[in-house]
Every structure is written in C-alpha cells, then in structure tokens.
Image (cartoon, rainbow, N blue to C red):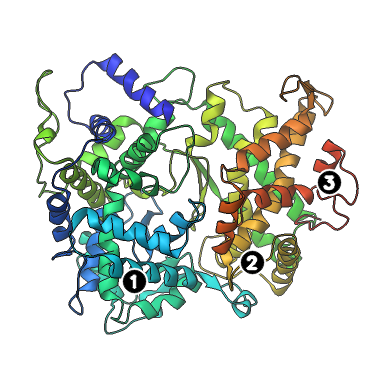
Amino acid sequence: MVDMERFFRYFVQLKGELTEDNFLSRMMWVYYACRNATGPRVNISAELGGIFEVIGLNGTLPLKEIARGHLIPVIAAGDRHLTLHPLFKVRVLRRSEPSEAGGFDIVLAAPETLYRRFLTSFVDSDDSTYADFVAKTMRLCTLENTRSAARKIMQLEKRLESFMLSSDEELMMPPREKHASLDDLFLSDNWDWPVYFNSLIASANGSIGNDTKVIMSDPVFFRNMASVLTGTWDTTIANYMAYKAIVELAPVLGQDAEYLLQFTHDYDVPDLGERQVACLSLMEKLFKYGTGIASKLTLGKEFAMTPRSHMDIQLGLIFNVSRHVIGGLIESGRSWVDPLDKGTALRKLRALRFEFGAQCNLVEYEHYRRNSVPPNTTLPPSGNRGKNADHPWLQHPLPRVAFFLYSVASAAYWDAWGSATSRAYDNRYTLTAFRPGYELQHTGNLIVPHATVAFVSQLSNVVEPVLYSVVAAGMMRGLVEALARSGSSVDAEFRSRLWWSIGTLEAYENISTCIESQHQAPLAKGRRMRSLEMNFVDNAVAYLLFRLYRDATTSYDSGNASVYSGARAHGDALTLDQMFFYNFATAHCDFRDEELWQQQRKFHITPAPWRVNVPLMNLPAFANAFECKPGSRMYPLQRCKAWK
C-alpha cells in the first residue's frame, strides 16, 4: 500500500500535473480526495438520501415497511451499484477469452457480515455493543430512533451466520455438486431468482431463466437461507442495506463516519492509518484490475512504467515445481487420493493454470474501461482542464462522485455478462492486490496477487528458497484445495462431476478428523465447512512448502549447515531450516490477541496460532530443526499426517 502511494507521486513527477481523463488519473483523484475527506459534512442525510433513492430505499430511515415484492429490485439495485451483498455474495466470473459469447459464470457464495467483522475486531464486544454500533451508524442520516431497527439487523446477521454452519449429520454426507440450475434453488412467492439476476445484469435482457446454471461456493448456506426470504424479514433487510451502504461509503462521509473506516475492508494493515487503508480499498473497488496493474508496476526497487516479468517467470517455475512435488506424492500412493482416483487427480493438477496478478498494461485497461462507460453518466468527465483550473468533480458532493464511479465500475462488471467483445478485466478475480492470498476458481485458474512478493521486490529480484514458506504458500494452498473436499465436485476437465471414490473420501475424512482432534473444541453448535477444509489444507501445505524449500536448497548445495547471523535479537545464528520456519510463522500469524482469537472461535474460524502451530507440530522437520523433546507440545507422540 505504501508503494502504491509512492507510485502515484512518482507518476506525477514524471508526467507533470495530470490534466487528462483516464483511469489512472481518476484513481489518483479518488484516493487523494478520500484522504482529504476528514472534515465535517453538513448534510450527510441529503447526500445519502439521493443514493438511497437510486437503489429503491425511499423514505425516512429506518424504514417502517417495504411493499411485498419490492425486495427483489431493491437488493438487485444495491448489489449492482454498491455490491452491498446483504444476503449472499454474487459475482460474474470470466471463464474464457472474448469472442466466445456466454463465456461467463455466475458464482454465489455466503455473505460476510459486519456483525462477524465487528465482534472479531474488538475485545469485550458483544451483541449489545454491536446493536449500539448499528444504531449509531444509522443515526448518521436520520433523526429517528434507530434502536429497534438495529437490534433486528443484528438478529438478521446472526441468522445468516447460522446458515453457514453444518450439522454433524451434514458433515458425514458426501461432497455436493457446486453447479445448479436456478430452479434447483429455493423459490417462493416473495423471491424469484431470474427476476433478481435480470435486474442485476442489464445486459441479460431477460435471458436468465430457471434453467440458467450457477456455481454455489457454499451449498449448505443456500439450502438454509430460504427462511429469511418469506416476507417476514423484508423491512429489516432493506434497513440492513441502508446500514451497509453507509459503511461502504464511509471513506467519503467525513469525520462523523471516521469510526467506520476499518469496516470498509476485511484485512488489517497495522503499520498504516485507517483512512489511508480505507481510501486505497475504495480505489480498488472502483478500479479493480487497474489497481492490480498499478501494483505490478511497483514490483522493484525503482518503479517502472511498463510491467516487469521477472517475478512472473520465477513464480511460474515455483508453480510447476509445486505441481510436480504433489504429483509425485499422489503417484507414489502417499496422499489421501485412492488409486481409483489417481488418474483424475494427476490430470487435474496438470490442467490447472497459474496467473500472477494483473496481466494487461495501462493502455489496455484504459481502453476497456472507456468502452464500458454507460451512456447515462451524470457527472462531467474529469479531464479537459488547464493546469490551474479546478477539477470539475469538485463542483459535486464527494459521496455523489464516489457513487457515480461505483456505477461506472458496476456497468463494466455486471454487463460483461454474455458479451463476446468485452475484455472483462474486472471480472477476472475478486482477491485484493493489497495482501497476500490466492483465488482458486472452478475454471482451473489459480491467481496469486502481487502483494505476495511485495516485500521481496524491495530487497532482491530473486525469490530465495528460504522465503518459499511465505511466497509459495498461496499457490500451494490453491493446488491442495483443488484436490481437497471443495475440489472433489469439479473434475480434471473442470466440469461439475463428483470424482472422489469412497476410498478417497474415507482417507480424507480420517485425516481431517485427526487434525480436528488437535484443535480446541468449538465454542458453539455446528461447524464451518470452510474452516475444516482450511485446517486440512494448512497441514498438507506445511510439509509441501518444506519439501519445496529443501529440494531447492539441496540443488543449490546450501544444506542445513548455512547460517544467518543476527536473525534473532540476541544475535544467535539460525540454520536455514529455522529461518524457513520463522518466515512461515511470520507470514501466517496475525496481530490479534488472545481474547480476539476466542471471539473468532465463536464464529468457527480457526485463529492464527492454531493454523501455524498445529501444522508445525505434525511436521517432524520442525521438531528436528528446533531440537524439540519427544512428548512436548511441538513433538507429539501421535501426529496427524496428510502425506504418508
């Protein structure tokens, strides 16, 4: 994030004052306008009121009633303009190059509630403090009493959270297919999926029907959520959307909304101020792939105006070696994959495609965004001004400008559906460019952001093996996930087909059960399927990363005898193996404390210490590196191994 701001300053110094209207100048304008939006806003209610009207939230907040049947267009408008996603997340994913009409998929997933984000961010937070938080936020744009509406919003979010949990009986069931027709999802007099999608995607022109296929990332959630779409919760859902819209626009609402900034994004950046992080997050939402391009230009000690490819080449090689390592373990019968399924697993590994962040240049993205602007724009262009002239957007309230840019971005995103000509860059991935991670798509694409190597690029142009525990972690997780439970419903041709045999399922469940026995018992009823799978993946990846590192150091003839002086505060020398594990822990730990980790457990989220320590205690190489005594916590007598 710091590099991004430095890049902006460098670009202005290189090019002079920006007078042209292009996506990069718009990115910079949004970012700096947001950074400066710290003063009081005298009429937040009126500014937000106009936005609420566009998405169909008419009337004084909190709303007392919403007409039956009106919920569908309201949710569709909120999702289209501001991606509010009050009940579920939806995205349009590009799965093929242009020239193939219909080369897009609709992907549905469980939502991320502000309730969960709040309770896992503050010590001593509870339902009462969160309800106060919601009421305070809604009072930013109304003089009415908001307490009752706030409590109902909290109850709605708690229900949504409960829908994500699986019962013990559901955990015993075989994996479910992810592809489904809309008529396979719940229908009621109050909810119609084709109406929702045809309202959300203007380019669909009514073409989305009950036979349209979608991909469900969380089948358990969508089976459970029908109870909130019967009409009883409609008014609460509408008020929830207004509340989420206020939070979404908080970076441009001035000092009264300053306390909301940390809830506009789902990642922590402890070394930067909340406003700086929130403004960069806002900028990325408005220029998704463009932010990825800009971040790629920062990969080096000096900024470049054309993308460098040295990291693409290195990560591509690491990806291929990682596939080879996993493939060897499967081929030799050392994985959970049954011999009956070995051929499918190996073909799927070979078919996976790796992509390192944004892959186009500034000109290509500018052409794409310029051709995607809807004809009914309501603000003047940002360019065509002299060097000393005021920016045209300064004539308008900042929330209105931000909403205009949201609408422009949404038109490019949603209306790519069905296009045979749009490059659809913003539809390529959803992960952020500002933190390490990965995104495994059902199409076989595995994307890793530039943030994965940002710290390396400031030190060296080469990724040393001792850093594989940091740099290769995301891609290795994606490779394992393709073969884990969630990947069992997509075969080697990336079609919807359950390819696991009983032998693979039983072996996987036995390993998973063993791993869960090493974690703390859940604090609440039910289990989060995603967390269970991530616990499995964490354990599988720890061994793979160490194997990858060891193979590389052996080929370099470095061995375990090499040392690095001064790595610890007291100056002791570290072996390369110890450095590898310290890097692993540093990359995967977070900045929370014990109380917040316990709050995460209430939501069935595995806290960072367990995601680090449990995989390491199951890895003999860790005990050897630090000379742990047999029977100690990090050298248990019984280990749970994903690889034989």
Q: Position of residue 252 (x, y in %)?
A: 24, 42
N-term mark: 2 or 3: 2
Label 3 vs label 1: CA separation?
A: 50 Å
Which amino acid type is marked by label 2?
Pro
Q: In this view of the protein, which residue sits in the foreground, 147 or 609? A: 147
Q: In terms of sequence position, does the residue under pointer 2 or pointer 1 come before the other?
A: 1
Does any portion of residue 350 appear in the rendered image?
Answer: no
Looking at the rendered image, the disc whose residue lies closer to the viewer, 3 or 1, is: 1
Asked where in the image residue 86 lies, by quadrant, the reply is: bottom left
Residue 405 percent coordinates (x, y): 21, 44
Residue under the point 40% across and 67% down? 157
Q: Residues within 10 Å of mark 2 (few under 14, many from 20)?
A: some
Which residue position holds label 3?
620
Disc on res. 152: 1
Q: Residues within 10 Å of mark 3 (few under 14, many from 20)?
A: some
Mark 1 element type = helix
Q: Three-letter amino acid code at disc 1?
A: Lys
* Quadrant in which the C terminus is drawn: bottom right
Q: Say whether marks 2 and 1 touch (CB < 8 Å).
A: no
Q: Quadrant of the N terminus?
A: top left
